[in-house]
């Protein structure tokens, strides 16, 4: 499981996909989510605006990520 450090209270699914370089722009997020399964805390969720908070786990393209708060 890979950690994704955030400096804010949350990150949206669309922002996460851009951060992970799975899409290059916000316009590609909708298309990506239509064609790929994304699981948030074990449940399928295809909302690009879904808020992801520290300790949430996201599985996309057979890789699992955990959101963690960067305290620095």
Image (tube, grey):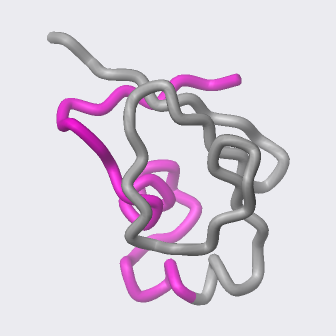
The residue located at (71%, 36%) in the rendering is 64
- Residue in front for this viewpoint, 41 or 59: 41
Q: Position of residue 16 (x, y in %)?
A: 44, 53
Is-magenta flag for residue 12? yes
The residue located at (37%, 27%) in the rendering is 5
Q: Position of residue 51 (x, y in %)?
A: 37, 55
Which residue lies most toward the right here? Answer: 62
- Residue in front for this viewpoint, 35 or 54: 54
Vertical placement of 64 versus 47: above or below?
above
Q: Position of residue 30 (x, y in %)?
A: 53, 86
Is-magenta flag for residue 13? yes
Count of marks placed on residues: 0
Magenta segment, which residues?
1-30
Q: Quadrant of residue 37?
A: bottom right
Classify residue 35 as left or right of residue 54.
right
Classify residue 5 as left or right of residue 13.
left
- Image quarter where the N terminus lies is top right
Vertical placement of 15 versus 56: above or below?
below
Q: Quadrant of residue 24?
A: bottom left
Q: Position of residue 56 (x, y in %)?
A: 53, 34
The residue located at (53%, 24%) in the rendering is 3
Q: Quadrant of residue 14?
A: bottom left
- Image quarter where the C terminus lies is top left
- Residue in front for this viewpoint, 67 or 22: 67
Classify residue 13 as left or right of residue 51.
right
The residue located at (64%, 66%) in the rendering is 45
Vertical placement of 49 versus 20: above or below?
below
Vertical placement of 60 versus 6: above or below?
below
């Amino acid at each position: 499981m890979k950690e994704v450090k955030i400096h804010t209270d949350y990150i949206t699914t669309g922002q996460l996909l851009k951060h992970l370089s799975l899409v290059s722009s916000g316009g590609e997020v909708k298309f990506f989510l239509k064609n790929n399964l994304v699981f948030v805390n074990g449940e399928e969720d295809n909302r690009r605006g879904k808020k992801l908070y520290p300790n949430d786990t996201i599985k996309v393209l057979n890789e699992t990520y955990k959101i963690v708060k960067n305290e620095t």
